[in-house]
Amino acid sequence: MTASAAPRRPGTVLVIGLFLISATIAAAAWHTGAASYLEAIAFVTGVFCVWLVTRQNIWNFPLGLITVGIYAVVFYLSDLFAMAGLQLVFFAINLAGWYLWLYGGENRSALKIRHAPRLEWALTVIGIAGATALLYRLLDEAGGATKFWDALVTSISLAAQWAQSRKIFECWWLWIIADIIYIPVCLYNGLYLTALLYAVFLALSVMGLLEWRKSVKA
């Protein structure tokens, strides 16, 4: 019992520390009026969701469903309509990813990390460009805030989420690019706690890239 429990201790300490830090930041932001209570809750669940993805833990999916559901409301209230709508798509992709991670491998086994072929990368880039142009036109008519950047980051995030749901290693490069764009967009629109969240996401995405690289080489 003692020998098997010892290796888990650093992970337990990390989880507790991550919760205390994220909860403290969220509570301070809500208390000072820098964030709504919804944004504060999503901050905590979002941090844990991405951390679980880096660990290839299946429980990232139910936590992700909660996070994107809350952010759909937060972004809508901030007139970031594409980013709000994206959360609803994320909700559906999370459900699909949950199934794929469990049964998407050979003979309905657990899915393993793999690299995307070059053709898929090319189609992804074309898809992002096309989706950005389409979303920009829709947002222009709807009067959304920061229309181009909203459209671009929405398109990149959608591609990243779909790649992540299929355990494509390169999803982390897409998330890194998206997070870099998200930070100034959120700051510009007054979502300061969410901007901090995406800064945390950026760090976790780099961590995920390094962690998944170990698995894909194994």
Image (cartoon, helix red, strand yellow):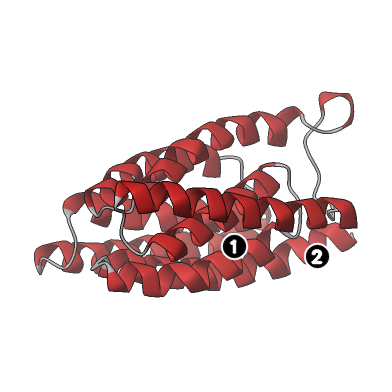
Residue picked out by circle 2: 214
Q: Is residue 29 above or below residue 64?
A: below
Q: Choose between 216 and 134: the one closer to the eye.
A: 134
Residue picked out by circle 1: 175
Residue 104 visible, this orientation: yes
Q: Choose between 195 and 24: the one closer to the eye.
A: 195
Which badge, 2 or 1, comes first in the chain's sequence? 1
Element under disc 2: helix
Q: Is residue 82 above or below residue 69?
A: below
Residue 23 x, y percent position in the rendering: 28, 61
Amino acid under disc 2 = Lys
* Residue occupying the far left of the picture: 32
Q: Residue at x 53, y 58 (%)?
A: 51
Instruction: Name the image quarter holding the C terminus.
Output: bottom right
Disc 2 to disc 1, how far (Cα)? Answer: 18 Å
Residue 167 x, y percent position in the rendering: 73, 47
Q: Residue at x 59, y 57 (%)?
A: 156
Residue 112 x, y percent position in the rendering: 81, 44
Amino acid under disc 1 = Trp
